[in-house]
Image (cartoon, rainbow, N blue to C red):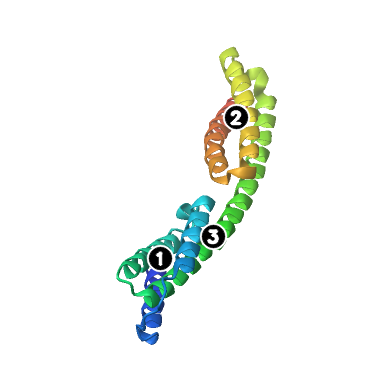
C-alpha cells in the first residue's frame, strides 16, 4: 500500500508540474537532465537500490520512460520535468538503500552476538554431560563445533560488506545451534 501511494504521488506531482508549466515547448532538448537522470539510475543500481528501495526505483524508471517518450515527441519541457523528477526518485532510492543497509548491518551484528553467546552456552551444557556422550556423538560435536566456529568467522567477515549474505549464514548456523541445544537438553535430562 505504501509503495503504491509513493508511485502515485510521484506521478501526480509530475503531472501537476506538466499542467502548471502550460506545456510550453523548450527550444532545446534537455540533454543534461537526461544524462543526470541516467547517471542517477546507474548509481542507484550500483548501490543495490532495486533490492532495498524498489518503490523509488520503480517510480524513477517510470518517470524516465515517460520522459524518454516526451523527448521523442520533442516535448522538451515535459521531458525536462520528468528527468528531474526521475533523478530525484533515484537519489531518494540511494538514500533509502544506505539507510536500509545500515539497519541490516546493525541487525546482523546483534544476531551474531546473540548466536555466539548461545553457542557458548550450548558448549558449556555439552561439556557438563560430555562424559555421558557416546563416541559417535562426541565426534559429531567436535565436527559441528569446528564447522560452527568456521561459519561464524565467515559470517563476521561477510557482515562487513554483505550483510544480507551474512544474515543467510547466520540462519544456517542457527539451525546447527538449535540441533545441539536440543541434544544438550536430551543429554541433561537423561543424566538427571
Which corner quadrant holds the N terminus?
Answer: bottom left
Q: Secondary structure at mark 2?
A: helix
Q: Secondary structure at mark 3?
A: helix
* Dot 2 and dot 1 residues touching (CB under 8 Å): no
Front: mark 2 or 3:
3
The residue singled out by tag 1 in the image is: 59
Give left or right: position of 144 versus 60: right
Residue 45 percent coordinates (x, y)? 48, 53
Q: Quadrant of residue 178?
A: top right
> In this picture, is 144 found above or below 21?
above
Q: Earlier in the sequence, mark 2 or mark 3?
A: 3
Spatial CA distance of label 3 from label 1 is: 13 Å
Q: Secondary structure at mark 1?
A: helix
Q: In the current view of this chain or complex, which residue is farthest to the top?
A: 135
Label 2 packing within 10 angstroms: few (<14), some (14-19), many (20+) = many
Q: Earlier in the sequence, mark 3 or mark 1?
A: 1
The residue singled out by tag 2 in the image is: 184
Label 3 packing within 10 angstroms: few (<14), some (14-19), many (20+) = many
Front: mark 2 or 1:
1
Residue at left offset 43%, top offset 58%: 54
Q: Quadrant of residue 133?
A: top right
> In this picture, is 181 found above or below 111?
above
Residue at left offset 37%, top offset 68%: 67
Spatial CA distance of label 2 from label 1 is: 52 Å
Q: Nearer the viewer, residue 56 or 139?
A: 56
Q: Earlier in the sequence, mark 2 or mark 1?
A: 1
Q: Which mark is residue 94?
A: 3
Amino acid at each position: 500500500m505504501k509503495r503504491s501511494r509513493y508511485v502515485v504521488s510521484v506521478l501526480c506531482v509530475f503531472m501537476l508540474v506538466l499542467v502548471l508549466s502550460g506545456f510550453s515547448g523548450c527550444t532545446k532538448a534537455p540533454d543534461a537532465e537526461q544524462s543526470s537522470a541516467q547517471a542517477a539510475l546507474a548509481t542507484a543500481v550500483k548501490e543495490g537500490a532495486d533490492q532495498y528501495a524498489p518503490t523509488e526505483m520503480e517510480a524513477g524508471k517510470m518517470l524516465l520512460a515517460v520522459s524518454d517518450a516526451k523527448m521523442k515527441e520533442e516535448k522538451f519541457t515535459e521531458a525536462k520535468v520528468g528527468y528531474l523528477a526521475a533523478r530525484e526518485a533515484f537519489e531518494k532510492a540511494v538514500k533509502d538503500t544506505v539507510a536500509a543497509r545500515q539497519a541490516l548491518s546493525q541487525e546482523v551484528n546483534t544476531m551474531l552476538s546473540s548466536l555466539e553467546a548461545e553457542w557458548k552456552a550450548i558448549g558449556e551444557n555439552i561439556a557438563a554431560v560430555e562424559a555421558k556422550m557416546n563416541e559417535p556423538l562426541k565426534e559429531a560435536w567436535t565436527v559441528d563445533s569446528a564447522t560452527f566456529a568456521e561459519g561464524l568467522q565467515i559470517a563476521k567477515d561477510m557482515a562487513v560488506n554483505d550483510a544480507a549474505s551474512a544474515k543467510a549464514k547466520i540462519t544456517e548456523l542457527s539451525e546447527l545451534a538449535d540441533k545441539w541445544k536440543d541434544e544438550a537438553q536430551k543429554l541433561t535430562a537423561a543424566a538427571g
